[in-house]
Amino acid sequence: MSLAFRTIRELGADIRAGRVSPVALAEEALQRLDTVGRKLNAVVTLTRDRALTQARRAEEELRAGRDRGPLHGIPYGAKDLLATSGGIPTTWGAAPFKDRCFERDATVIERLEQAGAVLVAKLAMVEFAGGMGYRQPNASFTGPGISPWAPDAWSGGSSSGSGSAVGAGCVPFAIGSETLGSILGPSTYCNITGLRPTYGRVSRHGAMALCWTLDKLGPMALTADDCGLVLDAIAGVDARDATSIDRPYRYDAGAARPFRFAVVRGTVDATEPGVRDAVAAALDTLKAIGSVEEITLPERPYEPMARIILWAEGASAAEQMIESGAIAGLTAPEDRVTPYARDVILAKDYLRALRLRGVVAREIDGVLSRFDAIVGPSRGTAGPRLGAEFRSAIRGSLPDLLGAIGNAAGLPAVGVPCGLTPEGMPVGLQFMGRAWEENTILAAARAWQARTDFHRRRPPLA
Amino acid sequence: MAAVDEAEILFALIRHRYADRLDAAQLEELRKTVDGLVRDLAALRAVTMADDEEPAQPFIPYRRDP
């Protein structure tokens, strides 16, 4: 019984039926990460000792009739910006921190342990979660993340290892983080399902801060259903993160219903041709599960607003690293330089962006009150190449209206595979919902995945 | 003030603070980055907002309970 490309639900059933053991799953995940995962530059640290300890405990508990739920005994990987104790390094993808260890676990790591999940690896990421301004894939001391869909294609960033490890069948799920595209991007390029929760839904305690008011942690998995199972385990208020919200969450995997979808005019046409064709076809397919209405949004500088918030807070969060000149030790040449430019953002301009953010949040909530989700491309491009500059909303070289609005307004979105380009590279579709409506967008994504098989297609490098 | 003028002035600040650790090519890279930031700032400043539009940023008073 192999772990590769089996969902959390399937593996959980296998464990409980005695067809496979948590220790055997952990061993296979470790082996697969060490071979396939390393070829994709997905791995920073294999956490073998901790994994086997957790897996043995899961076996004993399940044998004794203590069942912690769907994640019990399931292996996973964590983006290497989540603090881990026990001498396991937490590197933030940055060479200056490649040996740095914390004495505590991030809240998400704690909650997954409480749920019985088995941490098998700290996964590669773009240095400083992309907050230094990288514009080409080679921006991590572990090397550029490689998509399992082509040896010369980027996995996306900044949750690059989380994307490729799941996409290559090394682990059934991983934790990623998104500030402005870092879950939906790699999920798209690695053909997996990624959930960006509502801001405040998941505690950021113990996670690297890139931008305090934009950072979110979320699951990356094979299906929307699995993302719901993981969110159920990691969501919830945390006294150690003042921005976490006391709004209980329970994943509801109930039956689908007819949905009301909106498409923002221009968002599909703004993508490259292969993406546009796949997303246009997906919108037709969606009509089988609901209505699809084209809408327009107020003219606003959505992307500049999101970027100014990101750059201003990022400059402050990494101030010591930047001012000391320690960024000279980073991998990407542009990351050693670009952060200095952010000194030019005046406090008044940052505050203006925050004020506009409030306006946008109210306007978009008014729009979404009439729909279950806004749908559109998860990413405007497909399969960026390793040796070239990529187009990105963060640098202003690629439109990403939904990404800017969704992240700035703190809205949840789930990205699902929706096709391949003529070159065979994955394309993603996103469902973006109202704040706190993860269950609604996950239901829509499940309905999509019940009608399509894009999420079951396997990459050539796995 | 024209956007290009503001970019020059702001770039001078960057050069003043960091030129000793950057070479000519890096400074040119920074100049382009500042140009992009100034375009973003101009777009933001063009939005009319009412005075009572407060920043979407909660501050929570702290009190340590015994």
Image (spheres, coloured by chain):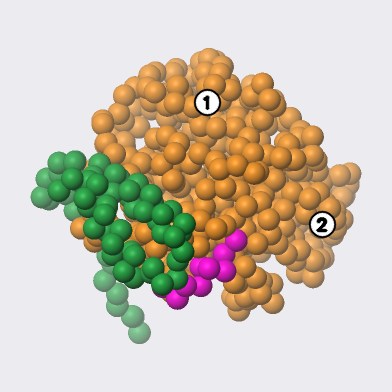
Q: Which residues are magenta?
A: A323-331
Q: Residue at x 52, y 26 (%)?
A: A272
Q: Residue at x 15, y 48 (%)?
A: B1
Q: Is residue A394 toward the left or the right of residue A168 in the image? A: left
Q: Quadrant of residue A447?
A: top right
- Mark on residue B23? none
> Color of chain A here?
orange
Quarter placement of the C terminus of chain A? top right
In the image, what residue type sits under mark 1?
Glu
Can residue A29 be seen from the camera position used here? no
Q: Measure the C-alpha gap from mark 2 to mark 1.
A: 35 Å
In the image, what residue type sits under mark 2?
Asp
- Mark on residue A272? 1
Q: Is residue A174 above or below residue A412?
A: below
Can residue A179 be seen from the camera position used here? yes
Give coordinates of residue A303: x percent, y percent: 36, 41
Q: Is residue A359 toward the left or the right of residue A4 in the image? A: left
Secondary structure of residue under mark 1: loop
Residue A272 forms part of the magenta stretch: no
Give coordinates of residue B27: x percent, y percent: 41, 59
Q: Residue at x 12, y 50 (%)?
A: B52
How crowded pointer 1 is (Cα within 10 Å; few <14, some 14-19, many 20+) is rated as: some
Q: In green, which chain?
A: B
Quarter placement of the N terminus of chain A? top right
Between residue A212 and residue B7, name the one nearer to us: B7
Q: Nearer the viewer, mark 2 or mark 1?
A: 1
Mark 2 or mark 1: whose residue is earlier in sequence:
2
- Mark on residue A34? 2
| Chain identifier of the residue bearing label 2 in the image | A
